[in-house]
Amino acid sequence: MPPLIDLTGTAFGRLTVIERTSDRVPGRPRWLCRCQCGRDAVVAGDPLRKGDIRSCGCLRLERLRTAITTHGHAARGNRHPLYVTWCGMRARCNRPRDPEYANYGERGITVCQRWEGPDGFPNFLADMGDKPSSAHSIDRINVDGDYEPSNCRWADPITQANNKRPRQLQEAA
């Protein structure tokens, strides 16, 4: 077994090692650490030295809060329905590989600048508000117009179905 490396006083991310504690598994030292947030945590030495553990858990919570506040409920695995709507609207207009791009972006339909960029989702929420029900979806009043506050509303399936482009008749070859 290699000699024990004393980690006392060493900082790893937000953690500073205070002292060695009893080993849960023989030969696998554990360390009492104090986090910058003031909490103590007992951590195994290997993941601490490798950088796999950098805080008492406060860093993860902080990142989660930041993801929710800056990206509008975009925490991984927990996407807010309005965030999904916003992402879908932008994909239809901006991503040529999106299945609906031909009906939106290729036709020149865009998303207004207010709803794009880092403040796009909070602005979208402020302008559109919450859906009246889960059956409602975003609808452009003028089907040839852009996604912008003055041209968008929440519509139920019947209103949405009645607000479509006229069908293009194909000539016989």
Image: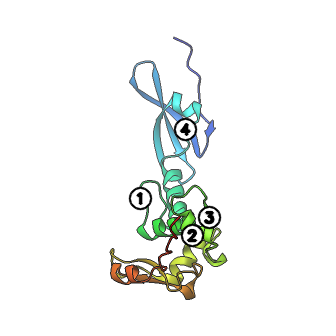
Frontmost residue, 138 versus 81: 138
Q: Residue furthest bottom?
A: 150
Of the image marks 1 and 2, the number of the one nearer the N terminus: 1
- Residue at 54 percent of width and 58 percent of height: 98
Q: Secondary structure at mark 1?
A: loop
* In this rendering, the label closer to the viewer, 4 or 3: 3
Q: Amino acid at mark 4?
A: Ile
Residue wearing tag 3: 94
Residue 158: give x, y in percent of width and height.
33, 82
Frontmost residue, 125 versus 99: 99
Could you tell me how far apart the alpha carbons at marks 1 and 4 are, in whole angstroms?
A: 36 Å
Residue 148: give x, y in percent of width and height.
58, 82
Examine the rendering and report whether any part of residue 106 can be seen.
yes
Residue wearing tag 4: 18
Of the image marks 1 and 3, the number of the one nearer the N terminus: 1
Frontmost residue, 26 versus 63: 63
